[in-house]
Image: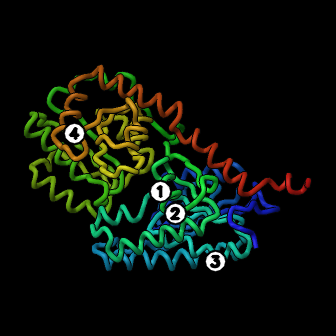
Amino acid sequence: MRRAGERPAGVGRGAHVVLVVENVSLAHDHRLRKQAASLAAAGYEVTVICRRDPGNRRLPGVRVLDYPAPRDADGRLAFVWEYAYSWVMAAVLMWRSWLIRPFALIQISGMPDVYAPLAVPFRWMGAVIVLDQRDLAPEVYLARFGGRGGLVHRILLACERTSFRTADHVVTVNESCRAVVRDRGGLPEERITVVGNGPHLARVRPAPRDRHTDIVPAGGVVCWVGVMGPQDSVELALRAAAHLVHDCGRTRLEAVLIGDGDQRPSLQRLADDLGIAANVRFTGWLDEEDVFAQLAAADVGLEPNLEAVVSPVKVMEYMACGLPFVAFDLPQTRSLGGAGGLYAEPGDVPAFADAVRRLLEDADLRAASGDQGRRRVLDTVAWEHQEAVYLELFAYLLPARELERSL
């Protein structure tokens, strides 16, 4: 049997690879779309297993095996049911994919960390297992429900450790997560690769050149994009917007919230309670092109995240559009965003709102921050840079057929 980390023989470009994502659709998982498109363009046969969505069929060259979406969870028991259902459906579709054509590599993405063991039987048949670790399930659970050190928290830590050790290789999104995989999972550095989640420049619509020179007297457009979960702290963005409207006199402010999630109803109620319902627009899910169009029309992007280890995708998307942002001053956010935005002390809503006000009132500051953010994406953050690392990893794990035949 092949040992973990050992390079398998006789497979390479042209090999069948399967990307499995937990309880998310291909349409709404931009990282998965970029990975699948890059692999297909590089000559791999790609199958994606995910939840069903009308947008899943829009990626050329990628086979999609999807299952009916479960009802969104509301509470712990419903959460367990939602993911148990998705786990079973993913298992069924893995075997269906294997029967269509045996695959050389299977990549598992998402959380909770219960999917990797499903791939073990395929390892016995020669497949490589890659874990694409984006979020840390124990931390997300604490943000949603609390209970550090409780039974569920300990189970999640055990599942995470098992998933790390099951995989032949772990791909993660930043250095903080790499440290967790190494220290909490006990993996050596050579089995961990950081692949960022920058936007694909070809799909980004930059803001008009003169956008940030506009005068924004008593209003302005601020924008947030993402999944509305408890761990995303979107309520802090609404409280900052309320501060701008009621305390700073920006009565014509428009806050555009793009996305959806189980927190949306409570966020809509909060906007009403704060007296800013007329200033807030919830768009729901939008196509990627429409998301970038909304960002290009905004004045300031908002990132109220409080999770220290997260590399916020929305900050990268703001910067790609040349949109200055405001965020809380967290290690990975500042490391990613640099001079592309302004930062406030974590959790300080008035300071967050004041940073937004400064950008709205200073066209030169908006322009300078937007330009520096976009340059940072162009130079280092964009998917075009990350793609090379990702494809090099697959070339290592699945060496080219031509090389194997020549030996």
Query: What amino acid is at disc 3?
Result: Trp
Q: Which residue is mark 2?
A: 185
Q: Disc 1 to disc 2, how far (Cα)?
A: 7 Å
Q: Disc 3 to disc 4, how far (Cα)?
A: 49 Å
Of the two numbered discs 4 and 1 in the rendering, the one whose residue sits closer to the viewer: 1
Query: What amino acid is at disc 2?
Result: Gly
Q: Disc 2 to disc 4, how far (Cα)?
A: 35 Å
Q: Which residue is mark 4?
A: 352
Q: Can you give x and y, in whole percent of width and height, for residue 231 in the image?
A: 31, 58
For label 3, the SS is helix
Task: Say which quarter of the image contains residue 103.
Answer: bottom right
Task: Say which quarter of the image contains residue 108.
Answer: bottom right
For label 2, the SS is helix
Q: Which residue is mark 1?
A: 180
Asked if labels 2 and 1 touch by Cβ distance under 8 angstroms, the answer is: yes
Q: Disc 4 to disc 1, how far (Cα)?
A: 29 Å
Q: In the displayed structure, does residue 130 sit left or right of residue 209?
A: right
The quarter of the rendered structure image containing the C terminus is: bottom right
Q: Can you give x and y, in whole percent of width and height, for residue 5 in the image?
A: 69, 61
Question: Quick one: label 2 or label 3, which is nearer the N terminus?
Answer: 3
Q: Can you give x and y, in whole percent of width and height, for residue 329 in the image?
A: 31, 40
